[in-house]
Amino acid sequence: MTHITIDGIDFDASKGSTILDVAKFLGLEIPTLCYDEGLSAWGGCRLCLVEIGTGKRTRLVSSCTYPVEEGLVVRTATKRVIDARKMVLELLIAQCPTSKTLQDMAAKMGLDKVRFKPKWEDCIYCGLCVRMCEEQMNAKAIGFANRGEKLKITTPFNINSEDCRKCGACIYICPACTLRCDGPNPENVLCGRCYNDLQPTCLDVSDDYNCWMGLKYLNVESTGFGAVCPSPHIEASFITPPNSSRRSKSSSLPLPDIQNAPGYGCENGVR
């Protein structure tokens, strides 16, 4: 066990835990964007910043990636921390002003003004979709391309990878809706709805060109996997840790067809 102090609370944490793990266990709220319990921690969004150290020897670190260490002193809500989080959130909103996830976070954090000129992009580079595809779906069908201002998330050569299962999990987990169904285009479709031209198994769906807006799940006969798009009735996506022996999804993530499909969540398609 590793003894730490977080917001004045003494706690013996398990070896290998992160600051965020401890905070969540103690019920201390730390905002996150690029973090998901079922995916590896990345620390890219910087919204989970906390202050560690004592006296004048303090610094900001990402709580989702920083491991606990003996005698560590953590403060999760100092003025320095709050100001840093608000600055990060301002930049993210300027990048993608239309993201409801970011708008909700701004309201919760009391941020009512963005000082930066909006870029009107539709990606905040949180990497959730990339890690979901690689770690949970074992596909690696999408990834980061280019660098700097030209950075983007795309499929290889802007066409679908042979490893893509059309499961739509990348669309489901995206907080900015950058990965959208563009209609019946077999070269880049990700959700399977228009690609297979099947009737949905639920009624919460708009039209073929905007099925990403409300579709819950479908049966995709050509691949054997269910296609999943975000639903406004689902507030959280909880998936099992990538190293867990139990690879099925919890009831809060509507992937009933995917979790029972042959080869899902298994190396080389073998259970």
Image (tube, rainbow, N blue to C red):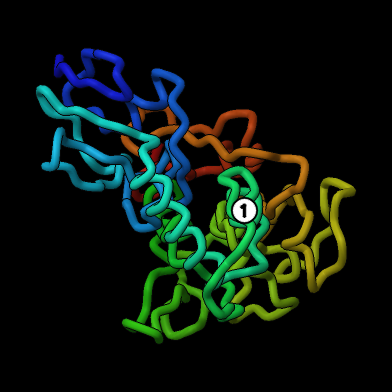
Drawn side of residue 14 relative to residue 27, left or right: left
Q: Position of residue 253 (x, y in %)?
A: 62, 38
For residue 94, which quarter of the picture? Answer: bottom right
Q: Return the residue nearer the eye: 107 or 101.
A: 107
How many residues crowd mark 1 within 10 Å: few (<14), some (14–19), many (20+)? some
The residue beneath circle 1 is 101
Q: Position of residue 170 (x, y in %)?
A: 54, 58
The answer, for residue 227, to whether it is visible in the render is no
The count of marks equals 1
Identify whether 207 is placed above or below 16. Answer: below
Identify whether 196 is placed above or below 229. Answer: below
Q: Residue furthest right?
A: 203
Q: Position of residue 262 (x, y in %)?
A: 52, 43
- Residue located at (34% from left, 28% from top): 21
The answer, for residue 97, to whether it is visible in the render is yes
Which amino acid is tagged 1? Answer: Thr
Drawn side of residue 4 relative to residue 124, left or right: left
- Residue located at (65% from left, 48% from top): 107
- Residue located at (61% from left, 43% from top): 108
Drawn side of residue 113 relative to residue 58, left or right: right
- Residue located at (40% from left, 86% from top): 150
Q: Quadrant of the N terminus?
A: top left
For residue 48, which quarter of the picture? Answer: top left
SS for tag 1? Answer: helix
Q: Quadrant of the C terminus?
A: top left
Identify whether 224 is placed above or below 114. Answer: above
Q: Position of residue 264 (x, y in %)?
A: 48, 44
Q: Return the residue nearer the eye: 12 or 14.
A: 12
